[in-house]
Amino acid sequence: MKFFVDTAEVREIRSLAEAGFVDGVTTNPSLIAKSGRPMAEVIREICSITPGPVSAEVTATEYEPILAEGRYLRDLAPNVAVKVPLTEAGLRACRTLSGEGTMVNVTLCFSPAQALLAAKAGATFISPFVGRLDDIATDGMRLIEDIVKIYRNYPHLKTEVLVASIRHPGHLVAAAKLGAEVATLPPAVIRQLLQHPLTDRGLEAFLADWRKTGQSIL
């Protein structure tokens, strides 16, 4: 499973990339706004840190403006994946951009039917939002299960399931068990994956025993 980090904070991305935890990055207008920097500058810098896909999202809502913004974002770096909304105009632009060889991430997916349309439009990634479904008392992981099953029924569909709106490690583990190809996680959730109380206790015990010997490895 590929891990994308969901942030526009360059220091966080660099730190996680150096640890080998990052296969790509997802951003959105809200995350870019939090960075307080020009969008193009941020995207270029992120793309220089990781060779994997970096999702940069359009803000237009009509076909021609989406296409224009998508082409501009695509030209910022060779590993940009243009993120478009799951609307008729967005999917039309997805079809055009993917036909030009551009990676496209179709975002804000909340149903299997939407995911099937995105795949037919040539999306590189489909981003179902599990946390937001959980927020309205709907099982977000059921959506992942359904999309993965549908895509596997049709091998000619090459769209990868990019699980988004992940709130905790449980979401990630469940998505991995279902066979989703990608998960995008906030930096804090990636670091939570490292944590287990027995790991901490075991390390403390080993170090305490070692200190009693009075030895030093170096």
Image: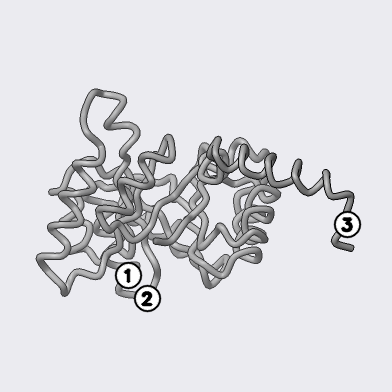
- Amino acid carrying label 2: it is Gly
Q: Which mark is residue 149?
A: none
- Helix or strand or loop: what does disc 3 sit on? loop
Q: Bin the neighbour count of mark 1 within 10 Å (Cα to Cα): few under 14, some 14-19, many 20 and up.
A: some
Left or right: where does residue 76 sit relative to residue 167?
right
Residue at image coords 32%, 40%: 129
**First of labels 3, 1 by sequence position:** 1
In this rendering, does residue 72 appear at all?
A: no
Residue pushed farthest left? 153
Number of marks drawn: 3
**First of labels 2, 3 by sequence position:** 2
Q: Nearer the viewer, residue 78 or 157?
A: 157
Q: Position of residue 212 (x, y in %)?
A: 83, 44
Q: Which mark is residue 101?
A: 2
Quarter of the rendering occupied by the N terminus = bottom left
| Residue tagged 3 | 216
State the scheme by which the image is colored.
one colour
How far apart in space, not on screen, are marks 2 and 3 (Cα)? 56 Å
Q: Position of residue 104 (x, y in %)?
A: 36, 62
Q: Bin the neighbour count of mark 2 within 10 Å (Cα to Cα): few under 14, some 14-19, many 20 and up.
A: few
| Residue tagged 1 | 98
Quarter residue 149 falls in: bottom left
How far apart in space, not on screen, are marks 1 and 2 (Cα)? 5 Å
In this rendering, does residue 202 appear at all?
A: yes
Q: Nearer the viewer, residue 208 or 152?
A: 208
Residue pushed farthest top? 136
